[in-house]
Image (cartoon, coloured by chain):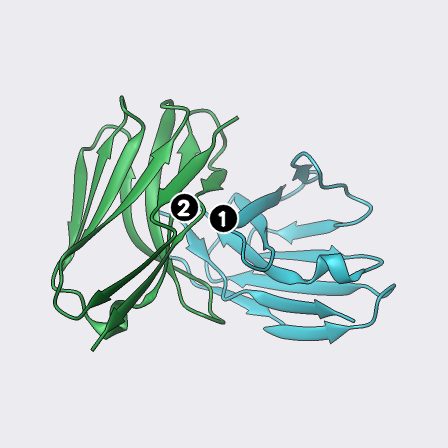
Chain colours: A cyan, B green
Amino acid sequence: SAVISQKPSRDICQRGTSLTIQCQVDSQVTMMFWYRQQPGQSLTLIATANQGSEATYESGFVIDKFPISRPNLTFSTLTVSNMSPEDSSIYLCSVAPFYGYTFGSGTRLTVV
Amino acid sequence: KQEVTQIPAALSVPEGENLVLNCSFTDSAIYNLQWFRQDPGKGLTSLLLIQSSQREQTSGRLNASLDKSSGRSTLYIAASQPGDSATYLCAVSLTGGGNKLTFGTGTQLKVEL
């Protein structure tokens, strides 16, 4: 199965600032997914990132708040912009090769 | 809109017990269903993936079943061990849904010595 390297693993940020999370996959994949897990909650899909096209955002998530880059088939970034304490969550990237889904280890974000 | 529910929300059992975790989903037009475990401070580990055409999958002490028509899946853990303590999540992808997963609410399992 694919192996994903996600960083940073955790960060504490000041409100109003931005944080960029990176995911590197050890093989080429068409789609990458970004999820958010708020405290005590399950995972919610933020957006789907395809190489060479704009990301597709789920209801409730907008590009200005969560811009995504996908420069090639093995790498993607998610930026959490103009952060507020409500953005404190775990953010995870994922890929879905035909043999199953793989997740990064997650980024635990705390906004103070 | 697909909704996925897991019962129970939390479970505490003594070591050695066999146990069943339940997952239900509202839209039966699923492409596949996957069970994950999540350990505190870590990402998700895939346990079992069941395609929509399959009825069950087995891996070691784990067995997952799927009943699409009734919108249900169960994860059976045999001879539970303290190392099985984690949160278990089921997730479904819809046919034509582009591999997007909808996650359940999770079952927090604690296996005690």
Horizontal and vertical percent position of residue B72: 29, 33
Q: Which residue is mark 1?
A: A29
Say the numbered circle drawn on residue A97.
Answer: 2
User: Residue B66: x percent and y percent?
Assistant: 23, 34
* Residue density around tag 2, few if under 14, some if 14–19, many if 20 or more, within 10 Å: some
Secondary element type, mark 1: loop
Query: Residue at (16%, 71%) from the top-left corner?
Result: B15
Q: Residue at x 12, y 68 (%)?
A: B16
Horizontal side of B93 relative to A56 (left or right) equals left
Q: Amino acid at mark 1?
A: Val
Label tally: 2
A54 to the left or right of B2: right
Task: Estimate how packed mark 1 is, as few (under 14), some (14 to 19) or many (20 or more) residues with alpha carbons within 10 Å.
Answer: some
Q: Residue furthest toward the bottom?
A: B113
**Which one is nearer the viewer's eye here, A70 or A110?**
A110
Question: Going by the image, does A52 lie left or right of B98?
Answer: right
> Residue at the spot x=69%, y=56% of the render?
A78
Locate the N terminus of chain A by quadrant: bottom left
Q: Residue B49: image x %, image y %?
A: 29, 45
**Pointers 2 and 1 in contact (C-beta within 8 Å):** yes
| Residue A16 locus on image (x, y percent) | 87, 63
Foreground residue among B76 and A48: B76
Q: Is residue B81 among what the camera can see?
A: yes
Q: Chain of mark 2?
A: A
Q: Which subunit holds the residue at mark 1? A: A
Look at label 2 and name its amino acid.
Answer: Pro
